[in-house]
Image (cartoon, helix red, strand yellow):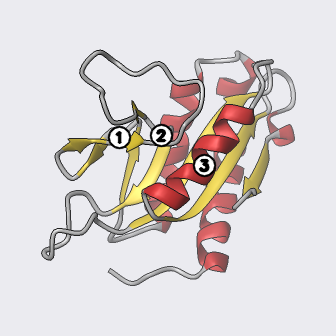
Amino acid sequence: MALASPEEVREGLERSLKRLTTEGEYLFRVNVNERTLTHKLAEYLQCHFGGWNVDCEYNRNGVDPKKLLNLSNCRPETDDEDGCTVFPDIIVHKRGRSEDGEPARNLLVIEAKKSSNRTDPKKDYDKLRLYKQELRYQHSAFVVFGVGLNPAGSTLEFDPE
């Protein structure tokens, strides 16, 4: 598994999003569920990240639930004593743990919203920052899917701060 440069990661993400907005124009026009769009984006990402696993809403860190300890305004489950379990929209990673017991390499984490979603994206940006700090993702991205009549209006912020 070769580590990808920031430029290669960004380029793979940009090409995948462009392919989705071109080939999936119907999905954008009819305003399908966000999960449908993230799933299709993950399929296209897999083409660019051979040797890596690309998963949607993957909630494991090894066998343990994936948690962010410092996420504000989260409502932990009754058995979640150490933080909030999280389900990133898309991740590019190696499943499981490395042989020395450290978490597997985490290349990219993506949070996504549709342009029709009017909720404040602050929590998404907070999660992206914490994924990098706490779970050691190398890169993060925030994607806004331009639904309706303008899928080309989709936007991407790579490694937002």
Report the amino acid beneath label 3.
Leu
**Distance from label 1 to label 3 (Cα)?**
15 Å
Q: Position of residue 128 (x, y in %)?
A: 60, 49
Report the amino acid beneath label 1.
Tyr
Residue 100, image quadrant: bottom left
Q: Earlier in the sequence, mark 3 or mark 2?
A: 2
**Distance from label 2 to label 1 (Cα)?**
6 Å
For the residues labelled 2 and 1, say whether their Cβ atoms are less than 8 Å apart. Answer: yes
Examine the rendered structure and indicate whether residue 21 appears above or below residue 96: above
Q: Earlier in the sequence, mark 1 or mark 3?
A: 1
> SS for tag 3?
helix
> SS for tag 1?
loop
Residue 38, image quadrant: top right
Q: Which mark is residue 88?
A: 2
Q: Kindly report which numbered mark, 3 or 2, lies closer to the viewer in this rendering.
A: 3
Q: Residue at x 80, y 18 (%)?
A: 118
Q: Mark 1 = which residue?
A: 58
Front-most of residues 114 and 26 = 114
Instruction: Judge from the rendering whether residue 40 lies leftward or rightward of residue 160; answer left or right.
Output: left
**Distance from label 3 to label 2 (Cα)?**
9 Å
Front-most of residues 55 and 120 = 120
Q: Position of residue 156 (x, y in %)?
A: 76, 51
The answer to whether any part of residue 161 appears in the image is yes
> SS for tag 2?
loop
